[in-house]
Image: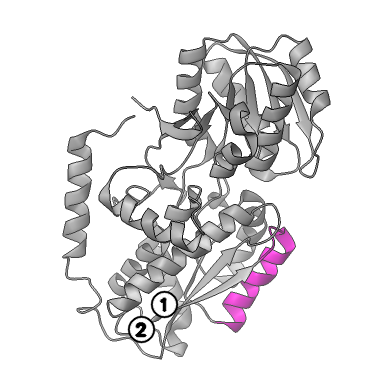
């Protein structure tokens, strides 16, 4: 749904009211210690590089802004980041290191559903909040009361996008192509897209799979073409999605594409080029949103990313740091070593109760299973750019 000017104005008022509230750094209780430690999990290598670099840069910007204004309780934030290489086992090792050795109060990350799904069952032992800025497979946060996601799950992201895609292109039969190894892509291809297509009167002719490291999609595209597909639904991260779009262009399969959470990075357009035109994508944040706070963030982050725009995980990661600041100050965290366990639990309780917290990606409200709630943009590739076509 397109945001009305009344909504934008009300959101701005909430943001201003929050900024002027008595829970600012100057009025917060003085904390013990030298720094306030926040953990950071970012895939800086492997398939998640674009998402990880944007997430880390965004967290760093938030930390720089907060520290410039006195930090939290008079102390600077110390952001401790690890590259888990987009690997589940490495992500679990990094979380354990942050919790047990570095003694962080809370963790921002990981990105991607596979690592999140690996870590969540261990949180009953670690008893430290993780809050993912880009993990969208439905159901994962319910695995532990310490598991949070400041994002929208794929079912919520894709529902309005599929409806808009069908309304424009009026297809009646589609083929789904999805990554059988990547957690969120598999979930979208096998569990999310089929019922959404059925809901919109669309017949799924076939579901075709590939593996994450595949580079040749000719067989899948040839099969989709032979079946008479009028559209392609993708459960795919952006690199694979772009390669599939290019293969479709090569084979003359000129039908519209709809993609999910992992496909909507700017890199999809960069790689696919003209083959991306007309694609519909879901997202949990609109980077080109004209709101002043979004544009102020964007101006800073593109400098850190050497001119590149971030995927939606960037602003979501930025907002996580500010939500932690709020909860550290509101919940009575002391930052004393002896209070580490109780401090972590106070943060968990506060974060679970967030309602309408202002952020550049939109207001943060945690639902009953600790996933972010709210609406998102409907992106369409037009003239080489993502355009929000939500009505």
CA neighbours of label 2 inside 10 A, class few (<14), some (14 to 19), many (20+): many
Image quarter where the N terminus lies is top left
**Residue 185: quadrant of the picture:** top right
The numbered mark, 2 or 1, whose residue comes first in the sequence reads: 2
Q: Is residue 175 left or right of residue 6?
A: right
Q: Which mark is residue 334?
A: 2
Q: Secondary structure at mark 1?
A: helix
Q: Is residue 253 left or right of residue 5?
A: right
How far from the left and from the top, in percent, is residue 54?
A: 52, 57
Q: CA distance from mark 2 to mark 1?
A: 7 Å
Q: Which mark is residue 343?
A: 1
Residue interval drawn in magenta: 84-102
CA neighbours of label 1 inside 10 A, class few (<14), some (14 to 19), many (20+): many
- Magenta: predominant secondary structure element? helix
Does 381 sit above or below residue 182? above
Contact check, label 2 and label 1, Cβ < 8 Å: yes
| Number of marks drawn | 2
Does 84 sit above or below residue 49? below
Q: Which mark is residue 127?
A: none
**Residue 256: quadrant of the picture:** top right
How far from the left and from the top, in percent, is residue 337?
A: 46, 89
């Amino acid at each position: 749904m397109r945001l009305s000017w009344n909504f934008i104005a009300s959101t701005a008022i909430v943001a201003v009211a929050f900024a002027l509230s008595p829970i600012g750094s100057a009025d917060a209780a003085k904390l013990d210690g030298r720094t306030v430690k926040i953990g950071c999990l970012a895939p800086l290598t492997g398939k998640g590089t674009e998402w990880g670099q944007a997430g880390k840069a965004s967290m760093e910007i938030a930390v720089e802004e907060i520290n410039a204004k006195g930090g939290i309780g008079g102390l600077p934030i110390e952001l401790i980041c690890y590259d888990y290489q987009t690997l589940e086992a490495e992500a679990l090792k990094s979380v354990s290191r942050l919790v047990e050795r570095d003694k962080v109060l809370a963790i921002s990350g990981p990105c991607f559903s596979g690592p999140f799904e690996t870590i969540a069952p261990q949180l009953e032992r670690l008893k430290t909040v993780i809050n993912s800025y880009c993990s969208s497979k439905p159901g994962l946060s319910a695995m532990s009361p310490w598991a949070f996601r400041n994002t929208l799950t794929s079912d919520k992201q894709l529902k309005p996008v599929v409806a808009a895609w069908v309304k424009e292109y009026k297809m009646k039969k589609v083929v789904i192509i999805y990554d059988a190894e990547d957690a969120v892509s598999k979930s979208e291809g096998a569990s999310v897209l089929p019922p959404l297509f059925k809901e919109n009167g669309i017949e799924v002719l076939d579901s075709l799979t590939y593996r994450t490291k595949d580079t040749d999609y000719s067989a899948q595209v040839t099969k989709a073409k032979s079946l008479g597909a009028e559209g392609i639904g993708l459960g795919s991260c952006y690199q694979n999605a772009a390669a599939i779009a290019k293969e479709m262009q090569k084979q003359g399969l000129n039908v519209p594409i709809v993609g999910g959470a992992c496909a909507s990075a700017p890199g999809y357009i960069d790689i696919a080029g003209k083959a991306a035109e007309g694609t519909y994508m879901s997202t949990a944040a609109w980077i080109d949103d004209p709101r002043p706070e979004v544009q102020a963030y964007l101006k800073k982050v593109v400098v850190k990313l050497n001119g590149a725009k971030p995927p939606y995980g960037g602003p979501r990661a930025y907002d996580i740091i500010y939500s932690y600041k709020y909860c550290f100050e509101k919940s009575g965290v002391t930052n004393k070593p002896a209070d580490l366990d109780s401090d972590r639990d106070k943060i968990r309780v506060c974060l679970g109760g967030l309602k309408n917290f202002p952020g550049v990606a939109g207001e943060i409200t945690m639902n009953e299973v600790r996933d972010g709630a709210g609406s998102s943009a409907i992106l369409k590739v037009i003239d080489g750019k993502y355009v929000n076509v939500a009505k």
